Amino acid sequence: MNLLATTSTVVVSSYALLSAVYKSVQAFHASPTRVSSVSSDGGGPESMPSVDVIVPCFNEDPRTLSACLESIASQDYVGQLRVYVVDDGSGNREDVAPVHHAYAYDSRFNFILLRKNVGKRKAQIAAIRRSSGDLVLNVDSDTILATDVVRKLALRMQDNEIGAAMGQLTASNRSATWLTRLIDMEYWLACNEERAAQARFGAVMCCCGPCAMYRRSALDLLLDQYEAQFFRGKPSDFGEDRHLTILMLKAGFRTEYVPDAYAATVVPDRVGPYLRQQLRWARSTFRDTLLALRLLPRLDRYLTLDVIGQNVGPLLLALSVVTGIAQLALTATVPWWTVLIVASMTMVRCGVAALRARQLRFFAFALHTPINIFLLLTVKAYALCTLSNSDWLSRKSAKAESQPDPIRPSGSAVPIRSSCRPTSSDTTALAAASDAD
């Protein structure tokens, strides 16, 4: 066996060993019996904390925004609930005006209209500083909440040691394309493997932006740090969910995952937008992993394995691919061992996911492996080489911060009731996720 073939075998074997250990330990800790349940009895309104729901939006489709607000208005939460919709200088403000008007006479809803686009993070902060609830729920404007999400997250947050909690994400447009189906499965795995295992130790590393609840007292301590994140001297305008979660852990709070609090969000239905999203997420992950490394000594040893598995694993896989291609190109021999290892691990992972989710569709997740090898690994490598780039990629760049307009009184708009409601695909996605568990 020549040196190149030997190197290829060693690298892919190392990848297989690391992945086997990491995924086995992860599956053990992610077992549903190890995820603490939430009591369904929260008591009366006086015993439940007040919740402020913050919805930043920028050039959102009116139907999508209407469906989001309708799902919030339909929450079965008995405590005090207030909603702050922050229009971040949208260019389609006239188009979404009827949606705002639809909730004009609902005393729970308040609208903040920013004169210029300042970015999602500053839009959130504008509402956080004008609200006063015990808990803050950040919701993306393209997300539909199940009717019990606020209640279930608030019940989990009754433990004062918990600074943040997230629900389970699904793709509301799952049936749109083959890509959205893959992303929906990817979300299930990220929530019910990665987050569920991390929650076993109260250290979910990223409470995802579409549906994450935070403790007000913790936010008050961290808001200035959250607002003024810099990387290599430049403002960091994305990855706000991961950064805020890491700040919570750094301050000594626990972060949790509530698997039966379902939220359906719109995911990219084309490869181009998907790769731009993945590039933005990869940069955010690399940046905040550097911050998270300082936390590892005081966290459970599993979290160290988790960081190694998520960062070293892809590196070994990339090296396996590079050496395999080099072997094929230079020696005209197929790297069968590499192909066999990657294919075997793919089918094992898909089989375990299908068994845990009780859905045969997860065998189709094998299609994600070539996407990962030939596209996502390249995106991650590019992200690592361009960490200082803070372009949002899917929206206009945030301009210099401007002062927001005062909160509009709830009754100041013409009461036009919107005809837009959550679509059947939205409710189907939530129902399917609930049935799967």
Image: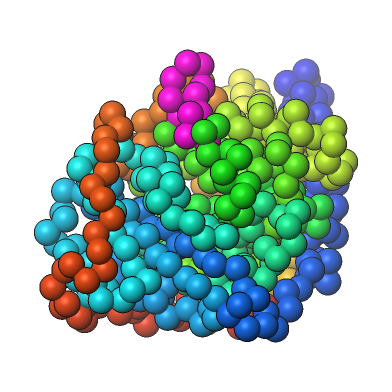
Q: Position of residue 379 (x, y in %)?
A: 49, 34
Q: Residue at x 33, y 73 (%)?
A: 107
Q: Residue at x 73, y 21 (%)?
A: 4
Compare residues 350 and 435 and report the one nearer the observer. Answer: 435
Would you say residue 236 is visible in this rendering?
A: yes
Q: In this picture, is 151 found above or below 192?
A: below
Compare residues 341 and 62 and report the one nearer the observer. Answer: 62
Image quadrant where one finds the C terminus: bottom right
Q: Residue at x 54, y 25 (%)?
A: 384
Q: Residue at x 80, y 42 (%)?
A: 303
Q: In this picture, is 379 found above or below 233?
A: below
Q: Position of residue 416 (x, y in %)?
A: 15, 78
Compare residues 78 and 64 and report the one nearer the observer. Answer: 78
Q: Quadrant of residue 261?
A: bottom right
Q: Which residues are magenta?
A: 226-236
Q: Is residue 231 magenta?
A: yes
Would you say residue 340 is visible in this rendering?
A: no
Q: Residue furthest front?
A: 46
